[in-house]
Image: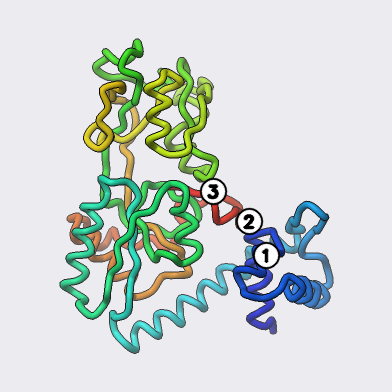
């Protein structure tokens, strides 16, 4: 039987791939991390990590152990939380956040309905940015986030918001005067890229590598934030597929938004760590679904929706 410290140390190191960061998260020394890993490796009878002076990598045995242990630990944590919630009702505090100004009203409607149903539970509302949305979920700063799908590696609720896609181009761009466009035009113009912290699944959805017919899409410069990406568009450095609400929330005289007639809508909803699924969180997702007019039956997809990152993905990676 593995001890709790061994499991937590192993899974944290499998995620961080760095002894120092693992020690910081667990509030122990790096020496203790090394000692625990060596003890576990002796118990298993093989190396779990390949260590060099510059890097730490999971061995095939280590990766298999991480894949097997993670859902078991998540299930135990969730069971304890559900038991605690059931014993005291929907109380305590829930930290909810939104990413993008136009999602805030939908989140506030959910907060209002949840508050009516569960007045003894305090809800703290925050805003996160592209640079810290995933990290805030991973480190527990927030419990649930209203963000764009796909959000790799997280559980997700039903889609609460949908919007058509448009192409952001410079006001003087040849495409600015078109009434509507096809995704095929992406092959003819550089596409501004999201920052490195953005997850692979999100990038494939928003800035694909190929058009629907298979033509390669040239990559333009990378922006550090959404506003910076739009500035790159305005400078004529590239084009950028975005949601139609950008017209209202990011109106700029130097940018035109042209509808993309063959692009599927962007969907947004609540995302959270599957291991953090509490009764409070379930009830908030239910309230958000009801407030948005969604069917409650559509409500709870606790599978790791849109999962495309490997288990060792850094918590700094992001899909938002």
- Residue furthest toward the top? 174
Badge 1: how crowded within 10 Å, few (<14), some, or many (20+)? many
> Residue 222: horizontal and vertical position, in percent?
51, 32
Distance Cα–Cα, label 2 vs label 1: 9 Å
Q: Quadrant of residue 158?
A: bottom left
Q: Quadrant of residue 252?
A: top left
Distance Cα–Cα, label 2 vs label 3: 11 Å
User: Tag on residue 56?
Assistant: none
- Residue furthest toward the bottom? 87
> Residue 141: horizontal and vertical position, in percent?
43, 65
User: In this orientation, which residue lies closer to the viewer: 119 or 265?
Assistant: 119
Q: Could you say whether the residue bearing mark 1 is in a helix, strand or loop?
A: helix
> Residue 124: horizontal and vertical position, in percent?
30, 67
Badge 2: how crowded within 10 Å, few (<14), some, or many (20+)? some
Badge 3: how crowded within 10 Å, few (<14), some, or many (20+)? some
* Front disc: 2 or 3: 2
Q: Could you say whether the residue bearing mark 2 is in a helix, strand or loop?
A: loop
Give the residue displayed 35% in from the left and 33% down from the top: 242
Q: Could you say whether the residue bearing mark 3 is in a helix, strand or loop?
A: loop
Q: Is residue 268 above or below residue 37?
A: above
Display colour scheme? rainbow
Distance Cα–Cα, label 1 vs label 3: 20 Å
Q: Quadrant of the N terminus?
A: bottom right
Q: Which residue is mark 1?
A: 13
Give the residue displayed 47% in from the left and 48% down from the top: 131
Q: Which residue is mark 2?
A: 312
Give the residue displayed 50% in from the left and 62% down from the top: 138
Q: Is residue 278 above or below residue 299?
A: below
Q: Which residue is mark 3?
A: 308
Q: Quadrant of residue 25?
A: bottom right
């Amino acid at each position: 039987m593995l001890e709790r410290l061994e499991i937590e140390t192993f899974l944290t190191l499998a995620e961080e791939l760095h002894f120092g960061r693992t020690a910081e998260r667990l509030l122990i020394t790096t020496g203790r991390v090394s000692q625990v890993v060596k003890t576990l490796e002796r118990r298993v009878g093989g190396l779990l990590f390949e260590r060099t002076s510059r890097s730490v990598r999971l061995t095939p045995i280590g990766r298999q152990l991480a894949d097997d242990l993670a859902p078991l630990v998540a299930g135990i944590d969730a069971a304890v939380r559900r038991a605690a919630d059931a014993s005291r009702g929907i109380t305590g505090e829930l930290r909810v956040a939104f990413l993008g100004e136009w999602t805030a009203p939908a989140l506030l409607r959910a907060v209002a309905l949840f508050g009516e149903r569960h007045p003894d539970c305090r809800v703290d509302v925050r805003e996160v940015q592209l640079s810290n949305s995933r990290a805030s979920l991973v480190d527990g700063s927030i419990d649930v986030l209203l963000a764009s799908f796909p959000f790799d590696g997280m559980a997700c609720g039903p889609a609460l918001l949908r919007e058509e896609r448009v192409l952001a181009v410079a006001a003087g761009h040849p495409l600015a005067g078109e009434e509507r466009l096809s995704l095929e035009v992406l092959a003819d113009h550089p596409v501004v890229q999201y920052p490195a912290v953005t997850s692979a699944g999100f990038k494939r959805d928003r800035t694909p590598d190929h058009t629907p017919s298979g033509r390669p899409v040239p990559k333009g410069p990378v922006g550090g934030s959404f506003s910076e990406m739009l500035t790159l568009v305005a400078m004529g450095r590239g084009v950028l597929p975005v949601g139609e609400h950008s017209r209202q929330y990011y109106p700029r005289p130097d940018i035109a938004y042209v509808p993309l007639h063959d692009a599927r809508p962007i969907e947004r909803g609540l995302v959270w760590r599957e291991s953090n699924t509490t009764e409070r969180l379930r009830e908030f997702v239910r309230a958000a679904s009801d407030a948005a007019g969604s069917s409650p039956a559509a409500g709870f997809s606790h599978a790791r929706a849109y999962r495309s990152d490997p288990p060792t993905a850094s918590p700094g990676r992001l899909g938002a």
